[in-house]
Image: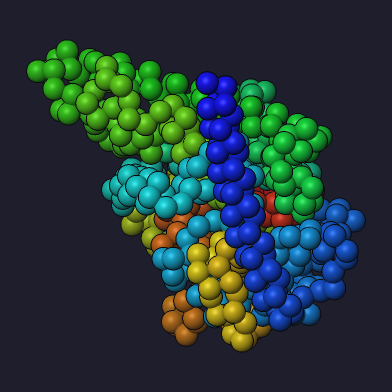
Amino acid sequence: MESVQSFFVLCISILVTALVLKQAKKWLLGHLRMSSAMKNVPGPDTFPILGNALDFIIRPQNQYLNEIERITKAHHPLFRLWNGPFLCTVHTSSWKYAEKIFNNSVHIEKYMFYEFLQPWLGTGLLTSTGDKWHSRRKLLTPGFHRAVLDSTHDVITEKSAQLIEILESKGKASQAFDIAPLIWQCSLDIICETAMGTKMNLQSEIRQRNVAYTEAVKEAMSSFVRRCVRPWLHPKIIHDLSPTGRKFNKCVKIMHNFTDKVIKTRKEEYSKLLRASMDNGDGKAHEARAINTKRKAFLDILIEAAYPEGYEKKPILSDEDIREEVSTFMFEGHDTTASAIAWTLYLLGHHPDIQEKVFEEVERVFGSNLVATSEKVSELRLLERCIKESLRLYPSVPFIGRKLKEDLNLGEYTIPSNTGVFVLIYFLHRDPEIFPQPEKFNPDNFLPQACEKRPPYAYVPFSAGPRNCIGQKFAMIEEKIVLSHILKNFRIESIDKPQDLKVLIDVIIRAEDGIKIRLHPRM
């Protein structure tokens, strides 16, 4: 009997060893092929073992953008970077190469760095791929139908009015201050009520947990970038034991506590409304699914998908499934939008002539009553061009990384499958051949005749192709309404000059010291 057991142990050991060796051989052949291909791709000189990672490790994070700019100018439109001895990525600032990435349903998988966000966002819409991404995208798309978006105007208007009340005290003081945290708080308040269906009153009732959530998001993004540029932090076990990992995981706990509260509140409301509806009807769950006849929130869609046969049945989507989509959309839905609003204010504050023209447009469209409708919002054409120009200069998401699923020719170079390719949106938007005077704030870049002449992938603040941002229309509506309220009530004066700003490239682009402005009441 003992000899038989020994024989089986030996067979299993041989099988495991063979599988390990097979995988090791596959990895080695892939690495050798990738290394050979990367020899032909231009890029900065490398250091032993660390590759190009040392160029970033020795610098503070507020200099990362300057370093990437230096490399981009030296090697436009394509260059490679070695992150340690085994990991090499390709980076492009060319719309022609970006088109080959975005306009291809094969290359929709996010690069491995996005896996570092999974403890926070799980495998939600941002980080998932394959069948899961397709099914979730299809499930959530109805939540962004025009009728649903139109129904959010009242909430955005209400939250914008609350923001104005907070800003009035700042205007009376006539002192410079950082407006970014207040914009972030307003945007989070909006996303909780419009997309999650949960009235949080974050602005009117500032609580420590709300401030903690926004601070945790900021810290988590910084920790994410720190991990990306340090190859020894890539393995999860090492990262989690490091100070960076401990800080990141602490932030994740804070953010999950916040999103869990949002989900719990809405699920309790769902349960009450569903049961009340069933008690008054014939007991058919499918007749009681629409829990909000005025507006079905993003979270409602997830809850209904989880309980297709009724709340008393076992859910199809787990609490974790719901949380990862809620975490993803609360992050992407408030942080990116708030960034766009803050940067637009900053740029308008440096261009008082354009700012006054936008103010006149807001006055003409709304008159004395800032009640938003889809028709009025669509008439804010100059403001929309200003927002788009702001997103050109300071795109909320400055870089996007994809993992190639098959070999791809970019110009004279063949980039092998499994290589990470990053589209540098921040620099793509500053291509002087596409945007003359690329550093200048010029809303005329988005006049219809200018847009018609421009290649479609030369401006991609919301990504493009099959994986474009699902919430971009919602973002534009929110940005227009919030900005209209601010500009109608105040004249904006920006303090820091563009050359003095320290721009941080986290997942979301932001100014290290905030967006400092001075408010001048209009009445």
**What is the residue that sits farthest to the top in this orientation?**
279
Answer yes or no: is residue 318 visible.
Answer: yes
Q: In this view, does 251 lie above or below 386?
A: above
Residue at x 38% of width, y 50% of height: 131
Quick one: 260 or 444, which is closer to the camera? Answer: 260
Left or right position of 266 against 179? left
Report x, y in % for residue 352.
67, 65
Answer yes or no: is residue 222 visible.
Answer: no
Report x, y in % for residue 399.
63, 61
Left or right position of 140 against 98? left
Report x, y in % for residue 424.
64, 67
Q: In this view, does 443 lie above or below 231?
A: below
Quick one: 218 or 105, which is closer to the camera? Answer: 105
Residue 208: name its quadrant.
Answer: top right
Residue at x 62% of width, y 65% of height: 30
Residue 452: name its quadrant.
Answer: bottom left
Left or right position of 25 against 131? right
Residue at x 47% of width, y 85% of height: 453
Q: In this view, does 142 lie above or below 120?
A: below
